[in-house]
Amino acid sequence: MGQDLVQILPATSVSALGQPQPASSPAREQTCQKSFYIETFGCQMNVHDSEKVAGVLLAKGYRPVEDSASADLILYNTCSIREKAAQKVFSRLGAFKKGYRGDAKTIGVLGCVAQQEGTRIFDRAPQVSLVCGSASYASLGGLIDRLERGERRVSGLSLDTDECFETELTRRDHPYRAYLTIIEGCNRACSYCVVPKTRGPERSRPSGRILAEARRLVNEGATEIQLLGQTVNSYHDSSPSRLSFSELLLRVAEIPGLRRLRFTTSHPSDFSSDIVQAIDAQPVLCNHIHLPVQSGSSRVLERMRRTYTREEYLEKIGCVRKAQRAISVSTDIIVGFCGETEDDFEQTLGLLDLVQYDQVFSFKYSVRPRTEAGSMEDTVPDEEKGQRLTVLQEKQRQIQLRRNQGLIGREYEVLVENFQAKLGQCVGRTSDNHVINFPGEPGWTGNYLGVKVMSAGPNSLVGVRTGGNNGSGNENPNADDGPRH
Ligand code: SAH
Ligand code: SF4
Ligand code: F3S
């Protein structure tokens, strides 16, 4: 999952793929006085949760605004995966020195820091009135009602749920690309990780509901769906259909009008060859897999409680490399975990050479409270962690540069995700998750276009359009509306 992504849901982005849009209806505008601002930190699951939260607020008659200064309700949807991520919310809250409730501003902390810190947040930041973890979002509407009735502090912190939070109201950010959570929480126990504590136990949505939502999204104009879960491939269908994860992929991919299906994040221990076979069999399934390895040393993996060895991980990669379609692979790596020696680190560097990843998200190990590793000795000094990170990133930069330069002259179909007005450039993404920038027009956003790669850097490609507009694949009345990243 992409980390430390910060996303602000802007006021102009009310294009809810055909969802009821109370804030934009004239009747509502007369009565709706309250506005909200939501800022999101962390992974795609958080980004999607914010879309759900925004939907709940829109249905309550709130309207979104672009800056916190003009909002009645300010929400921070937080991440606590590393210390730095967790601190961000407190630096935001620092800007509001005194209580705002009386001044008609209500401040709420949602997400993983909310769950981890709980009501201690009220002590540390008295200006906060609402604290709610993701497992309690079903009660968020009720908590807001209580604040509106004048309660000073409300919280939703129960992890005691076996259901995913589902809402028909979700206000999705993009007209063409939609996130869809299929599994919440995590039942694993990686020794460094807060997620099982912040998102609770694993809960899978019944396949029938997932398929119904996917069909609805496609009917409303989405041509790309990304299935989400912290361990997305640990999916267990509790309904009588008992679909396996790969069967679910194939069923979603068959929906007429859907052009791309992605999924993230896959856990190596639950990664099986039927997923590769599904990608081979169904071109709608994107030929990209995010398969976090964390370390190239079996000794470190053991201490991390990752439940696989270096060799077992490499076997899974071998299975991916045997596919008929070339499947790109990305990963996450932690450097400087407790007890990581120079030799362990060298093994991680060696793994980069062996696997030849297309993208690596790498992080310095950050000690997290209430994790198993939190009580292990953090043996690698911060400076050493920093040096290892630099070495690893430089090595991967060279690998990516070489790999990307090998793509010069190739033609791809890209989905145009964005238009950068200043540069006059479109930002397109290939099925295998490469980003290609090419000269274009704002109206091309949302279309699938042919692009030829002309030059390459380590992180992106530069291309030219080859002609042939393949259309949006789905008649989309909002073709030029809505925000883009
Ligand atoms: N569920 C995914 C990862 C979710 S967290 C998986 O199992 O792979 C995203 C990434 O953050 C992790 O893959 C890991 O690389 C990193 N991460 C998690 N905890 C961390 C910590 N305490 N310090 C540094 N990086 C961490
Ligand atoms: Fe964290 Fe491990 Fe669960 Fe991923 S699988 S969310 S790293 S505990
Ligand atoms: Fe961060 Fe929570 Fe996601 S800790 S990475 S926002 S699950």
Image (cartoon, rainbow, N blue to C red):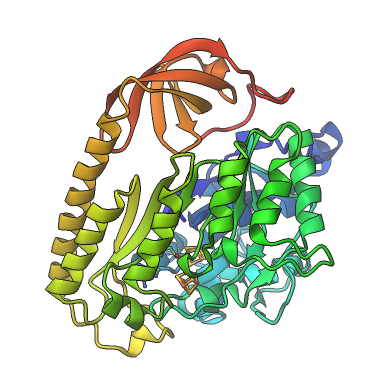
Compared to residue 265, the image places residue 149 above or below, namely: below
Q: Which image quarter: residue 380?
A: bottom left
Residue 64 location, x and y as percent? 65, 44
Looking at the image, which residue is at 55% across and 18% down? 444
Looking at the image, which residue is at 61% across and 42% down? 281
Number of residue marks: 0
Confirm whether residue 389 shows in the render: yes
Relative to residue 359, is residue 16 drawn left or right?
Answer: right
Residue extending furthest toward the bottom: 375
Confirm whether residue 46 shows in the render: no
Compared to residue 197, the image places residue 394 above or below, namely: above
Relative to residue 461, is residue 414 drawn left or right?
Answer: right
Residue 161 location, x and y as percent? 72, 78
User: Which of the pair 211/327 is nearer the observer?
Assistant: 327
Residue 162 location, x and y as percent? 73, 76
Looking at the image, which residue is at 48% across and 39% down? 325
Residue extending furthest toward the top: 467
Q: Which image quarter: residue 344?
A: bottom left
Residue 237 location, x and y as percent? 74, 66
User: Which of the pair 166/448 is nearer the observer?
Assistant: 448
Q: Which image quarter: residue 174?
A: top right
